[in-house]
Amino acid sequence: MSTNGIYDKQAEAYEAMVSKQPDLSGIIHGIRPYEGLNVLDLGAGSGRLSMVLARDAKSLICTDISEPMLNILDDKLSEVYDSRNWTTVVADHRSLPVDSSSVDLIVSGWSISYLADSSHEQWSDNLGLVMAELQRVLRPGGTILILETMGTGTETPNPPDFLTGYYAQLEHRYGFSHQWIRTDYVFDTVEEALQHTGFFFGEELTDKIQAKQWSTVPECAGIWWKHV
């Protein structure tokens, strides 16, 4: 099954996995305090970032190409927050149904990479289209913050080869600053780690989990940000 197929058909399993990762609100807030801001969560998925942003944002637009993922996000936010300050929109990153100069902060977690990995002949053009859309919807003085994988099952950054071109362009073509953090998956048992990761990452990771008896699966993530 393709990754996009997983997001459509195994959205609940994906949510069960990413729910074991750390709260990233402090990381985001350290780069751009977001209280009272109009925020866009690009590729919001099941709400990994939206769940922590909605509490303090003035408004939150959650876009994703997968409607099942957005349905999970909407249900989760509805359970926690009485005041509805968010909207969900099925959308492609390259053509956003969002007004120009309407948001103060754009966050995107583990999402732009699906258009900008080097298996796509047009990956660089795709990235250019995404960046142009982000610039269009962002207000002057706004901030773009992107999180992407730097390797799962590794304790230090080891990004996949098919993403290194994308990461290099973020820094050298588009002028983003960069750092990395750990975003480990913390499970109760080795068996739970195996159960919740294999469907997404495959045998290479589950073999490593089994060999090392990991209940906490290490992962590194890169953060790229730009104040416009």
Image (tube, rainbow, N blue to C red):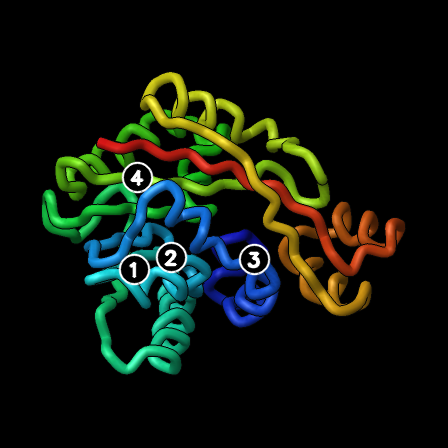
Q: Earlier in the sequence, mark 2 or mark 3?
A: 3
Quadrant position of the C terminus in the picture? top left
Determine the secondary structure under disc 4.
strand
Sequence-first tag of 3 and 1: 3
Q: Nearer the viewer, mark 4 or mark 2?
A: 4
Badge 2: how crowded within 10 Å, few (<14), some, or many (20+)? Answer: many
The residue identified by callout 1 is: 62
Which residue, as the protein is rendered here, is positioned at the far top? 172
Query: Amino acid under label 2?
Result: Ala
Mark 3 / mark 4, whichever is N-terminal? 3
Image spot of residue 150 (x, y percent): 59, 36
Cα separation between marks 3 and 4: 21 Å
> Mark 2 and 1 residues: CB-CB less than 8 Å, in contact?
yes
Residue type at mark 3: give it: Pro
- Going from N to C along the chain, the mark reached first, 2 or 1, is 2
Q: Residue at 59% of width from left, 56% of height from top?
A: 1
